[in-house]
Image (spheres, rainbow, N blue to C red):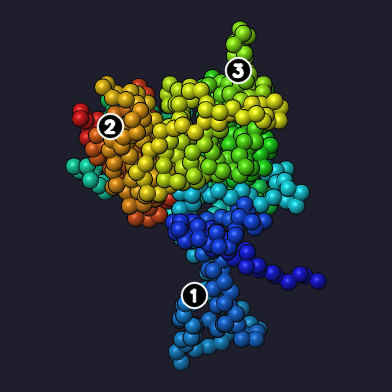
Amino acid sequence: MVPLIQITADEVNQIIYSYLQDSGFEHTAFTLRVEGRLEQSPHFNDYIPRGQLVELLTKALLYSEVETHCKGDSLITDCRTPFALLKKHDCDISDAMEGVVNGDGEEARNKAPSTAVKRKAAIPAEGDGQERRLKRSAEPETNGTINHQASTISRVVTPSQNTDPVPMDIVPNNSEAQWKSRQTTQGAGDGSTLDVALTLRGHTSEIFACAFNPVYPRILVTGGKDSTIRIWELPEASDDGSSFSEPISKPPIVLRIQNKGEVDGTDITSLAWNPQGTLVAVGGFDSVLRIWTKSGDEYMTNPQHRGSIFRVRFSKTGQFLLTASLDGTTCVWEVATKTLAMQYRCHSTCCLDADWMDEDQFACCGGDGNAYLLQPVKPRDDEKVPIHLGKIRDPMTMRTLKGHSDEVNIVIFNPSKTRLATGSDDFTARIWDVTAKPERVTASTTKGGSQVEQQTESLVLKGHTKAICSVKWCPKVLDGRNEMLATGSSDGTIRLWDSVTGESLQIRGDHKGPVYAIEFSPDARFIASVSKDGWLYVYSVPTLKLVWSWYSGDFRRIIYDLDWQMSDKYNRISLCLGTYNVVVLDINRVPTLRNFSG
């Protein structure tokens, strides 16, 4: 006998909590989380897709429509009244059109299917999933592990080789992978509408990450919700930068992740090239680390993590790879041998970000409100033993950087690797002097003999009124100024800070939605920001004067991520759009940016 369907109040509360987070109702979500004691629920860490509540309600309406219009073995097909969540349904059938189709008759067999049966569920409303960074891991099996054996990867070089069913096109002509010039109405800071954007089409869902190859400037990698990674070979730039290059002549390399287990595909959350530009590492919701070559060949796959991977970072030499996961651990991988060097469990909850200090030391942060700096155990003063590369396997000193009162979303070292910046849901960023001696060394040790230290002194950057979503160091120290830091927040503002005094130097509030990503230009002349409102703004540094802006359009107006490339004759910005497209902006074609001298 098939067991009855059971829906518990706890499950309903979890779905409502997810909807509130996605919609930006942070205070209401917090209240439900506390009063409902959701953290004590076994479902609290279950993965709930964005828009799940809306999708379930849509399917419920479709079921109600069919149930209402089915009369025995007959079906009402001419009802003109749409179904709604908050209104009672009354069928509107005129005498001229009134009719009940009998399923046994010849006439019924010749009729087209009812629109009620053919109709697809409405697209769920776009939520702030990236704003909260979707801090829920995939649902484990009963033994506490995820079935990774069911994951397979297929390499698709041309569209004709892809045998998967073709998904419904939401965007017109979205199935053909090609470049296409387009004109977009510009915003404040522009004197005219410029043809500067080339659109890469091919993804079938939102795109969350993009990265230019650091060595081969014509290669761009993108990944998103459609469980694919696409490696694009961009066209050659024109010699004088005055005109657009020819469109690409071949489609991208498509790496498709196919899951046959409990996890339905995987959202791509993080991408990173190694310094040599030969390998790209990928992390996603299915907890599996994957590395491919730039030509699309699989290099390694490992299911060590038991939660979604939110960050992948190569070390400066490319010898090691760092991964941060919602299972609360950070893994260090030896790239050449394709093996796990060490796995560290620092956090009591999820690990959200990690960054390298050098080949031996790194920092991580997570949902417990702490950041950690892991360093090789230093020799005694009387021991003349240098710290060599490869010490990552030795016992480590774990320094707790304690001060934030909520989840820490970001850790990032400054270019000189002397200070660490953190950004948190407590509305603040902090700057830590990692060269300073910690205030306290605890008597306890971790497993393996690692020492535990604690540091509480930090420079607190206050001013934002919502969570910090992005933190970036200025790549250069400008003449006459201290080293600067920029932050982007869910409050729709970006701020430029003096990292020595903690002074808020400039603030801009042009965005009408959460700021998802910010990026300095490599020459430190500009800073760009993107948001849920679909706008890209480019400001001068250090004045934060608005120099140029670009709008993605009214359809699915959202930009998730950006990357800024500047090398030789290339100067361009890649954008991940909610329209399932990637846009590359040729900055050399923007006179206000090319000729800016302020």
Please say if the residues under marks 3 and 1 sit with CB atoms less than 8 Å apart: no
Residue at left offset 47%, top offset 77%: 86
Residue at left offset 52%, top offset 26%: 438
Residue at left offset 62%, top offset 8%: 382
Nearer to the camera, 338 or 242: 338
Mark 1 burial class by Cα count in 10 Å: few <14, some 14-19, many 20+: few
Q: Which residue is mark 1?
A: 85
Q: Which residue is mark 3?
A: 378
Q: Quadrant of the N terminus?
A: bottom right
Q: How many marks?
A: 3
Nearer to the camera, 514 or 153: 514
Q: Position of residue 480 (x, y in %)?
A: 26, 22
Amino acid on which the number 3 mark rests in the picture:
Lys
529, above or below 45, in the image: above
Q: Position of residue 343 (x, y in %)?
A: 66, 32
Q: Earlier in the sequence, mark 2 or mark 3?
A: 3
Amino acid on which the number 1 mark rests in the picture:
Leu
Q: Nearer the viewer, mark 1 or mark 2?
A: 2
Residue at left offset 57%, top offset 82%: 68
Q: Earlier in the sequence, mark 3 or mark 1?
A: 1
Q: Position of residue 141 (x, y in %)?
A: 73, 51
Mark 2 burial class by Cα count in 10 Å: few <14, some 14-19, many 20+: many
Q: Is residue 499 visible?
A: yes
* Quarter location, residue 172: bottom left
Q: Which residue is mark 2?
A: 541
Q: CA distance from mark 3 to mark 1?
A: 64 Å
Q: Nearer the viewer, mark 3 or mark 1?
A: 3
Instruction: Kindly state the secondary structure of the residue where label 1 is placed.
Output: loop
